[in-house]
């Protein structure tokens, strides 16, 4: 069995590798946890493990996958192999295995025992509309069939057994909910909180099957799942906490605002609601959260899951593609492609392929092989020195984007932009000034 198979075993890996900030000081759920997590991320001080949460008996952990170092630890590989490992998982899924008994059901609350107020759900940012579940993986299933799906959705606490849920237009969950709502039926779902980190990574990948299969591929063995107490949805057996709920049909209620991955507060949104039917949890559970507007949020939802597909789509269009990157500073809306160009029209084709990779990708910059796509100043140098706007910038109007993009309308419709920042054919005689690397310790003694 792998060294990591749940949140607890991964916490030990983080601790061993000095990637865990253990906080004994009492902290408040209102703003303080979010503020500390943001500062830990800025200073690259590891995940934050809050052991003493005011007015709650359950500790909180956040920032678990907030850096490439911690993602590499979760996958058991080096940082430079992350895209390769996640890409291989898409082609080699491993089906989950069902078990009859599971740690996540060591404690069961139903009926009047259900109370979301007992969970340490933070209000991360000062202008958030209230406490939000941000670190929960939604496990859903089609109404008439067996196909399951994993996804991330924000969920605002509305009451003891009520949550608001924003369901994005392009999610498989939206397909399942539309099917149920058309029949006037509620859609059973579950929220898995505190799981093996590969389940979080798998939940961000776009896959027509069950993303639990991708999590298994990432872990190298099947993920154990167990049937919910109140529905036939199967959830990770080693989850810390499971919230069993159903999406109410034909009803919308305003939820938000929330500090989102765009770095802005989102507007309040008319969204469906959830009726919570049960809460199950392990003995001595740990609550996992993700701070909004954080690199962890962007890494999980927009960077890590998308780069393998971006490499696959762009390489299909051109074998000259060397590398790709979705930088977290672009909120997941920007894709960078390093290309060994053979034809003047090739960069535009590659940019179009990048836009088709995933709905979030709005802006694409294609650069030559001499430009470091991991260095923002190098990319901006190429844009400033190699782009003739009327020739090298093109637009795709009325394309599907993300609803939370401030540049989209409320359905996510937007204009996408491609920038060919490669050197033009008539400028090939230009030679870039390059200084060799030296060991500066020899000069700074």
Image (spheres, rainbow, N blue to C red):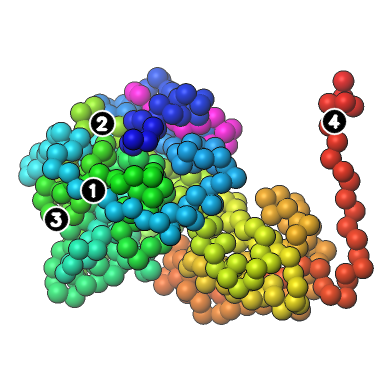
For marks 1 and 4, give the one nearer the viewer: 1
Q: Which secondary structure, mark 2?
A: loop
Residue corresponding to mark 2: 285
Residue corresponding to mark 3: 232
Along the polypeptide, which appears first: circle 1 or circle 2? 1
Label of residue 415 in the image? none
Q: Which secondary structure, mark 1?
A: strand
Q: Which residues are magenta?
A: 41-52
Residue 442 visible within the image: yes
Q: Residues within 10 Å of mark 2 (few under 14, many from 20)?
A: many
Along the polypeptide, which appears first: circle 4 or circle 2? 2
Residue corresponding to mark 4: 440
Residue 118: x percent and y percent? Answer: 21, 35
Asked if residue 49 is among those painted magenta in the image, a careful observer would answer: yes
Along the polypeptide, which appears first: circle 1 or circle 4? 1
Residue 274: x percent and y percent? Answer: 21, 56
Q: Which secondary structure, mark 3?
A: loop
Q: Which secondary structure, mark 4?
A: helix
Query: Given contact means CB atoms under 8 Å apart, are the residues at marks 4 and 2 in contact?
Result: no
Q: How far is mark 4 from mark 2, CA to CA?
A: 49 Å
Residue corresponding to mark 1: 97
Along the polypeptide, which appears first: circle 3 or circle 4? 3
Along the polypeptide, which appears first: circle 3 or circle 1? 1
- Residue 173's image quarter? bottom left
Q: How far is mark 3 from mark 1, CA to CA?
A: 15 Å
Residue 270 left/right relative to 328? left
For marks 4 and 2, give the one nearer the viewer: 4
Query: Given contact means CB atoms under 8 Å apart, are the residues at marks 1 and 2 in contact?
Result: no
Along the polypeptide, which appears first: circle 2 or circle 3? 3
Q: How far is mark 2 from mark 3, CA to CA?
A: 23 Å
């Amino acid at each position: 069995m792998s060294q990591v198979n749940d949140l607890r075993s991964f916490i030990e890996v983080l601790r061993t590798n000095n990637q865990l900030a253990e906080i004994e000081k009492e902290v408040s759920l209102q703003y303080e946890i979010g503020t500390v997590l943001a500062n830990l991320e800025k200073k690259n001080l590891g995940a934050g493990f809050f052991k003493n949460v005011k007015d709650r008996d359950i500790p909180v952990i956040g920032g678990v996958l907030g850096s490439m170092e911690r993602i590499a630890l979760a996958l058991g590989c080096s940082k430079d192999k992350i895209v390769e490992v996640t890409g291989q998982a898409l082609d080699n899924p491993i089906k989950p295995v069902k078990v009859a008994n599971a740690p996540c059901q060591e404690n069961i609350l139903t009926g009047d025992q259900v109370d979301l107020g007992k969970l340490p759900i933070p209000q991360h940012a000062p202008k958030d509309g209230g406490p939000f579940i941000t670190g929960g993986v939604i496990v859903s299933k089609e109404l008439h069939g067996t196909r399951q799906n994993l996804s991330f959705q924000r969920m605002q606490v509305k009451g003891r057994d009520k949550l608001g849920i924003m369901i994005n237009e392009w999610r498989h969950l939206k397909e399942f909910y539309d099917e149920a709502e058309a029949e006037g039926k509620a859609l059973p779902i579950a929220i898995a909180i505190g799981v093996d980190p590969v389940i979080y990574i798998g939940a961000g990948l776009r896959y027509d099957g069950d993303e639990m299969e991708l999590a298994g591929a990432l872990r190298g063995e099947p993920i154990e799942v167990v049937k919910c107490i109140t529905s036939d949805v199967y959830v990770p057996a080693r989850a810390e906490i499971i919230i069993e709920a159903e999406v109410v049909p034909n009803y919308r209620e305003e939820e938000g605002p929330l500090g989102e991955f765009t770095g802005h507060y989102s507007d309040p949104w008319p969204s469906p609601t959830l009726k919570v039917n049960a809460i199950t949890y392990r003995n001595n559970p740990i609550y996992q959260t993700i701070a909004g507007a954080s690199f962890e949020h962007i890494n999980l939802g927009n960077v890590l899951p998308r780069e393998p597909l971006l490499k696959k789509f762009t390489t299909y269009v051109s074998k000259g593609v060397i590398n790709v990157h979705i930088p977290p500073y672009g909120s997941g809306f920007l894709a960078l492609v390093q290309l060994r160009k053979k034809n003047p029209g090739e960069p535009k084709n590659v940019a179009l392929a990048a836009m088709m990779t995933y709905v979030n990708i709005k802006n694409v910059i294609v650069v030559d092989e001499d430009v470091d796509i991991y260095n923002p100043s190098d990319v901006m140098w190429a844009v400033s020195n190699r782009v003739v706007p009327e020739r090298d910038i093109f637009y795709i109007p009325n394309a599907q984007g993300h609803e939370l993009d401030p540049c989209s309308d409320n359905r996510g419709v937007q204009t996408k932009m491609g920038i060919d920042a490669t050197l033009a054919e008539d400028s090939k005689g230009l030679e870039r000034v390059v200084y060799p690397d030296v060991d500066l310790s020899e000069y700074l003694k």
